[in-house]
Image (tube, rainbow, N blue to C red):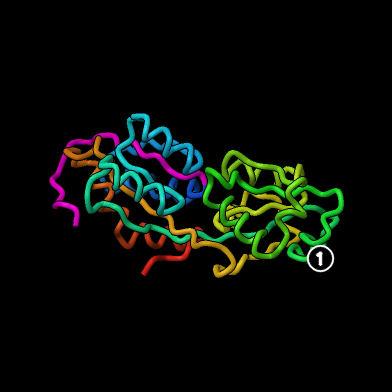
Amino acid sequence: MLPGIASTNAATVTVAVASNFSAAMHDIVERFAADTGHTVRVSFASTGQLFVQIRNGAPFDAFLAADAARPQLLEQSGQSIAGSRFTYAIGRLVLWSRDAALAGGNCRSRLYSLGTGRLAIANPDTAPYGAAARDYLVAAGLWSRVKSQLVIGENIAQTMQFVASGNASLGFIAKAQSLDARLPEAVCSWTVPDGLHQPIQQQAILLKRAIDDLVAAEFFKFLHGAVVRDIVARHGYALPE
């Protein structure tokens, strides 16, 4: 359990956040600032990229990853505060397209007949949503068939840009992204059943840099609360029990 939180003057917390969670994080930061007067400075990137930065000493107080593996590694290496790691959201993977040629069609069926089309996924070696997309493609027997037609995004945000701009006819993105009102209207989408890829268990952890930081601890306590759970659910994530 986290320690009790003492009152402090307004201060800033620095947080590394997986790019799939950007829309929800903006809402969380805004509400936290309104409730406490504190500021949250956020850096968005792929989970793998942020993990490397943290291992190399980047000055973050907390890490909201898109997987459980990297927070566990930070815990095992002693770079985090013991007992702080928890699951804040469970991600969902969506196959999405705005390609007019697919109007009235089926996104999933098109995977089997891409033709000259391109398929966008996040880098499966650094981005958990990319790893989940690869899991599904391998399980479906499609990985070797589509591998030469992949467009690889550095993170899930860049992957979304590829498919939203039409540079790829299909893309595996986070369900949370598919709910963004700023996206062009989809012509087809398909939510990949959870059992067809490894669970996207998104975990957060307080880092050693924040061990005496009451504001960072207050922010983490806020992440556990009902306000944040409502925001997480509204942005298309499943909630941990």
Total number of numbered discs in the rendering: 1
Q: Is residue 211 left or right of residue 14?
A: left
The answer to whether residue 37 is visible is no
Q: Position of residue 175 (x, y in %)?
A: 57, 58
Q: In the picture, which quadrant includes the C terminus?
A: bottom left
Q: In the picture, which quadrant includes the N terminus?
A: bottom left
Residue type pointed to by label 1: Gly
Determine whether 16 is above or below 65 in the image: above
Q: Does the magenta stretch include residue 157?
A: no
Determine whether 155 is above or below 234 in the image: above
When asked about the image quadrant of residue 137, the answer is bottom right
Q: Where is residue 81 in the image (x, y as percent from the top left)?
A: 23, 45
Residue position marked by numbered label 1 in the rendering: 105
The answer to whether residue 46 is visible is yes
In percent of the image, x 26 and y 51: which residue is there?
Answer: 84
Looking at the image, which is closer to me, 195 or 232?
Answer: 195
Looking at the image, which is closer to me, 23 or 138?
Answer: 138
* Residue span colored magenta: 1-19
Q: What element carries label 1?
A: loop
